[in-house]
Amino acid sequence: MSRTAEPALAAGGGERPASARRRRPMSRDRVERAALRVLKPLVIAVFVAVTAFPFLYMVTLSVRDIQELILDPGSLWPRRLTLDTYADVLNRQGFLTFMRNSAIVAVASVVVTLLISVPGAYAVARLRFFGHRQVHFLFLAVYLFPAIVLAIPLFVLFTMMGLRGSLLGLILVYIAQTVPVTVYMLRNYFETVPRSVEEAAAIDGCTRLSTIWRVVLPLSKPALMATGLYVFMIAWNEFLFALLFLVERRESWTVSLGLSQLAGSIEIPTTVLMAGSVVLTLPIVIVFFASERLLTEGLTAGAEKG
Amino acid sequence: MSLTLQKQEGRAGLALISPTLVITLVVVVLPLLWAVMLAFQDVRLINIRSKGLFGGYTLENFRYVLSEPGFWPALVNTLVYTVAGTALSIAIGLVAALALRDRFKGRTLVRASILIPYVAPVVAVAFLWETMLNPQYGIVNTWLSQPIAFLSQAKGTFLGVEVPVALLTVIAFEAWRYFPFAFLFILARLQALPADLEEAAVVDGATPTQRFRYVIMPQLWRIVALLAVLRFMFTFTKFDDVYLLTGGGAGTEVVSVRVYNFLTSRDDIGASAAQAIVLAVVLVVFLALYLRFFAGGEREQNR
């Protein structure tokens, strides 16, 4: 380091020692680097605090008695752990039923969406059919179109057809809203499957459908997982359509809807509802982190092209 | 021969894509067209069967909706909420992405922590915020000398300036919940940047802020611009967050919440649809302006 600097400094002549002393420790570069070295851990700590603390607080609040919260709202840690809140929320408040509904809706949406979007994505990736270039615009439009506009006609339609209060209508909407994105995600992946493998399968006597079933799908397991989990998360978290379609029938509420409806009531203690929030959040967080790499790569890789 | 093969391929393609097309057509495209028609009809749930799909078109809904006293403030709220929420979430996401760019011990955990607000169900996080900000037993208020009703107080004074408390809280929620989205995209871009440009800048003696300003940021503009469009579109028509936090009260009413209220409690389908259409049109106008402005900016940059 010092050796390379020497010729330049030597050219400076007599001022060499002074300038060397002044410039090196005080240079903007050094100041900035030093500041960043201090700032960076600080910033990271703030981010962790701001994101993790609320959820830790959620969990600690869910395992204490409401009396404790009211008497000592500033305490972070429960003095006496109790799981009665969970028993209360799951049985008495009906969250077990809500979870069953959410699970039905989410799983059905995932299965049907995949059944529809796998052939669709394959067609877009591999086959030249009439309008295969234009189809992206349709999907992009569906993906970006505001749900609140769509909510009006669907609300009216489902009311007229008597589909309100049934999970079927909700599943239908979730499928329609996720299919465009899943087709897009899967198409990106299918395009990376080498054509030669498929051609080999065709020569071995596979029809198109059996090529998809026996060759493309086994090769695309990670993409299928990622897409399925994406749909699952959307269906589990969704609120607006659940509110519009199901609010009048308590026995068909999803977990999201159940929590939002009960959150306003005075009779149910906040800590019990916090237990409900944990029950609502935990499956999603587990699913997400179990598959995080797949999911974020899939999503951001798709966006990269845009 | 080749023609028939091509024909066959085309037919197979259409057959495979048709379930996708049918469901998007039936559940998305046709209802949207219907929504437009409803906006021009005087319909309520009671008289909808007798009205029919066509005919009876009128501009009455639009006249009524635009002259309602609550509409324009709601539109202004929507704009403020959207612009501030979009800008903040992208800015915070950028800081987070820069902070987490280099490897360090525990980065995976920090990253996971940052993503939770975005992944968690909106109902759960909104309830969590409500509880934490509650004036009686909310933990945030125990840290303050005087409790603040963050979500039910329209106006308050802060350092002598009058501020819209609830609206700011809702914006803070938006920034908190969606900065991970920007973070994800920006981090992915950052990690894909070629290292040699920055190495060259270091050799040339560029300081960290200079490198950020002149080397990193110019390579991020594209993704930031894309994020701005996406977040603007999503936030502008967002319903869940505001509805769950304040129900549209305390000066936070946005147009989508009005659409919902007209649809359910007022049972005025026509007016509800008209407002939704106005919202969508305003969104399209803003996007067109932005794209025009931005496309011009990019051309200049390339020059």
Image (cartoon, rainbow, N blue to C red):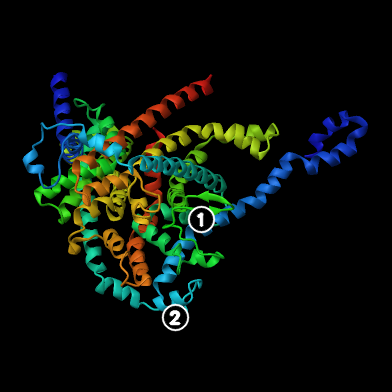
Q: Is residue B55 left or right of residue A3?
A: left
Check disc 1 and report its element: helix, strand or loop: helix
* Snapshot quadrant of residue B20: top left
Q: Amino acid at mark 1?
A: Val
Q: Residue at x 51, y 57 (%)?
A: A50
Q: Amino acid at mark 2?
A: Arg
Same chain for marks 2 and 1?
no
Residue placed most toward the observer, A208 or B156 = B156
Question: Dot 2 corresponds to which residue?
Answer: A80
Q: Nearer the viewer, mark 2 or mark 1?
A: 2
Q: Which mark is residue A25?
A: none
Q: Is residue B69 left or right of residue A34?
A: left
Q: Is residue B135 left or right of residue B242?
A: right
Residue placed most toward the observer, B14 or A96 = A96
In the image, is residue A290 above or below residue B97? below
Q: Position of residue A183 (x, y in %)?
A: 26, 39
Check whether the beta carbons of the residues at disc 2 and disc 1 lie within 8 A of each other: no
In the image, is residue A168 above or below residue A136? below
| Residue projecting furthest to the left | B50
Q: Is residue A284 visible?
A: yes
Residue placed most toward the observer, A18 or A97 = A97
Question: Dot 1 corresponds to which residue?
Answer: B110
In what quadrant of the picture does the C terminus of chain A appear?
Answer: top left
Packing grade of label 1 (10 A; few <14, some 14-19, many >=20) is: some
Q: Residue at x 44, y 53 (%)?
A: B154
